[in-house]
Image (cartoon, rainbow, N blue to C red):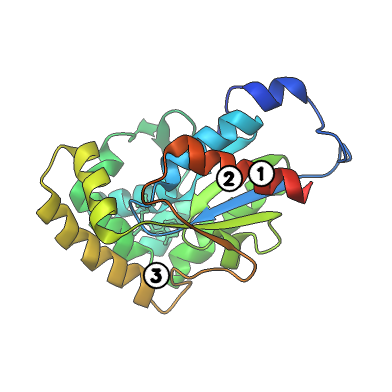
Amino acid sequence: LSPTRASSATWASCWPDSPPGRGSLSRMVVAIDGPAGAGKSTVARALARALGFIYLDSGAMYRAVGLMTLRQGGAASERAEELELQIGERVLANGEDVTEAIRAPDVSEAASKVATNPGVRAALVKKQRELLSDGDWVVEGRDIGTVVAPEAAVKVFLTASPEERARRRADELGTDVDTVLRDQALRDAQDTAREHSPLAVAPGAVELDTDGLTVEQVVERIARLVEASR
Ligand code: DC
């Protein structure tokens, strides 16, 4: 699994190696959790770029397992354990570029389903923790602040109204809002009600409602939290 370091921008160029006040051996994790369509990906990517941190989209891992399970069948936990992932600008699963394939609606549904499987979660959480053991990261998902990295220096729970989230996703996919709203309600229910690591606000997380805020405003607020935690 080899994610890319976000290209350096303003802050990173000021502090190329070790930001002020932090030892060179320290690491920092910024956990960004929340429901689909709250703006996690856009915000997490932009934040990683601004800070010079590595960006990890943990949802892409569940999507890759969903895709492989749809295609190959069998136990989803086995598909998760055998999965070789490279996540950067492109997502490679077992050597194949699945960047577009994992965004298909049937794969979204399959990802949400395999995410309820404790064996799948254990395999992916293990891979995520291995990655996060070194370096500075912005990680987005559903259970980053609660399970994967409860010790994260900054934990954010991003939200937005269901209508706003559906509108954003419909824009992204080029589909109609009503269909997205219906699918979204289903996935929200599945993600929140599942027995293992349901979507929940982590203790110590800052809840941020992105309705009416620009991406820049959200990124700036989280960047201030990161600054305050250094
Ligand atoms: O963020 P996303 O829509 O790409 O996530 C795909 C699915 O994976 C979604 O149903 C929630 C699940 N997921 C999860 O359970 N835990 C994570 N850390 C990330 C995603």
Residue shown at the point (44%, 38%) measured from the top left: 215
> Residue 5, can we see it?
no
The x, y position of residue 106, in whole percent, is 19, 52
Residue shown at the point (42%, 63%) measured from the top left: 77
Look at the numbered discs 1 and 2 and tell me whether their residues touch, using CB distance below 8 Å.
yes
Q: 145 or 100, which lies in front?
A: 145
Q: CA distance from mark 1 to mark 2?
A: 5 Å
Query: Toward which corner of the image does residue 161 lie, by quadrant?
Result: bottom left
Residue shown at the point (34%, 55%) measured from the top left: 36
The x, y position of residue 209, in whole percent, is 44, 56
- Which residue is under mark 1? 224
Q: Which mark is residue 117?
A: 3
The x, y position of residue 113, in whole percent, is 30, 65
The x, y position of residue 86, in whole percent, is 49, 36
Q: CA distance from mark 3 to mark 1?
A: 36 Å
- Which residue is under mark 2? 221
